[in-house]
Amino acid sequence: MTNTAWRQGEVIEVDISDLSDTGDGVGRFDQRVVFVPDTVRGDRVLVKLLQVKPKYAYGKLEQIVKRSPGRIRPSCIVADKCGGCQWQHINYDYQLIAKRNQVVQALERIGGFVQPPVDDVLGADSSLGYRNKVTYPLGVSATGQVQAGYYQKGSHQLINLNQCPVQDQRLNPMLAEVKQDIQKQGWSIYNELRHQGQIRHLGLRIGRRTGEMLLTLVVKDWKLPRIESQAEEWLQRYPQLVGVSLNRNSDRTNAIFGNETRCIAGVPALREIFAGLEFQVLPDTFFQVSTETAEALLKVIQSELNLQGHEVLVDAYCGIGTLTLPLAKQARQVTGLEVQSAAVEQAISNAQHNGINNVTFQIGAVEKILPDLGIIPDVVLLDPPRKGCEANVIKTLLDLKPSRIVYVSCKVATLARDLKLLCKDGTYTLTRVQPADLFPQTAHVEAVAFLVLSPLA
């Protein structure tokens, strides 16, 4: 009976025992794994099998036989359709447990660590209304109305939104009203299949501490009639809006922003206060979307390092200096490495603006710059993109042997891979991993790992 049930279209009953790093519930049927979206650890569910492999399958939730105590009513009326969040139906405490499990399992399975020292997840003060930046693809309804929202799960079908519970609630009026303004102006909406139309995305950004806002339209080209007068009208309508910009992306691509941004009205950047410092943040600047939780994670790093003012520190993948500058206030000398020249320009400007003089920045790929720095740092801070560190970065660290390494990761699979290499042969010891929830209501988890050089290395 079991074997005949393991095929596409069959409905089976499973208990959900875990949550995957993609947000799906994980159950087992006849010693095979079944991934089921929209479920919670503790659910018993009927599942229709959609994609069936010999050892695993993907299914669709058909019916909840027994509800998990961790299941709640979503805060968003389109949470079951919108792909922006995966976990609004899950109690926040359950989300944090699932995220810690993600980190532990990655370190055990990929990294080979036995009982890795993983702390409880650093949770957000609020699991809703935390996002300081949103970018919405635009579309047109069947009746010709301009829409903005996120794509439906597993599709490119746009789910129209007039508000979003995870974004800073001060942005909601603009989300609803700017669509109407675009409609009135008669500006065409980009169609990705035909590569025609003007406006691709609506970007909104807010300084959580300052309240300053930016509005950005991502366009195929600069030809947008009457944009100057409309931008001025927006500045008048929204007192906290300090700048309106256009970003040009003329490529056939899934990337949101292009390489060039023009300020149309107001100023090109907003001010944000982070760790007691003032940062200038542009529309396309990388800055953590949860200001408060990122700051709490920085405090963990500062506490764990306990810098005494004599240390030499290298911040690899430093961006605009979000972590570099607060740490520079506690160290003797800091060097930031970053491949994007625009980010380095902002980092230098932010350092000067805050009167921080013991930090220098270098433009280039970390794997090329780090071996030739000519210094042996006491501490190296790594904050690479999702793909993790290049092999040559790991090799250079094993050659340089800094006393301590702090690895900030937004993808625990690549974190585990790189930590395994750094701790190979006992060169480094993993002393602590602090996960943090910078993305409540989603399956994403941030983690910081602390490594110390072994005495005999």
Image (spheres, rainbow, N blue to C red):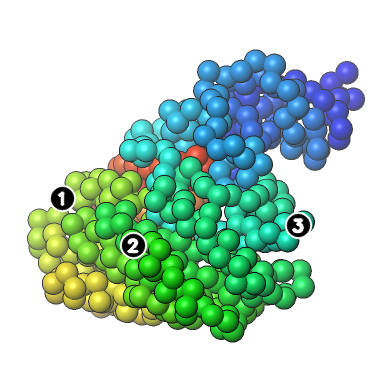
Q: Of residues 253 and 357, which is closer to you in this image?
A: 253
In percent of width and height, residue 406 lies at: 31, 54
Q: Of residues 267 and 193, which is closer to you in this image?
A: 267
Which mark's residue is nearer the viewer, 1 or 2? 2
Indicate the quadrant containing the N terminus: top left, top right, bottom left or bottom right.
Answer: top right
Q: Which mark is residue 143?
A: 3
- Mark 1 residue element: loop
Indicate the quadrant containing the C terminus: top left, top right, bottom left or bottom right.
Answer: bottom left
Q: Residue at x 58, y 61 (%)?
A: 180
Q: Amino acid at mark 2?
A: Pro
Tell me the residue that label 1 is attached to.
306
Q: Amino acid at mark 3?
A: Thr
Residue 436 visible in the current orientation: yes
In percent of width and height, residue 405 lies at: 30, 56
Q: Residue at x 58, y 27 (%)?
A: 40
Mark 3 → mark 1, Cα distance in angstroms: 60 Å
Residue 439 visible in the current orientation: no
Q: Mark 1 or mark 3, which is nearer the start of the sequence?
A: 3
Vertical arrangement, residue 414 with respect to residue 391, above or below: above
Tell me the residue that label 2 is attached to.
239
Q: Mark 2 or mark 1, which is nearer the start of the sequence?
A: 2
Q: Residue 316 is drawn in which quadrant?
A: bottom left
- Label 3, residues with CA under 10 Å away: few <14, some 14-19, many ≥20: few
Q: Of residues 319 and 424, which is closer to you in this image?
A: 319
Q: Residue at x 34, y 75 (%)?
A: 267
> In the rendered structure, are the residues bearing label 1 and label 2 in contact, judged by CB atoms less than 8 Å apart?
no
Q: Of residues 388 and 207, which is closer to you in this image?
A: 207
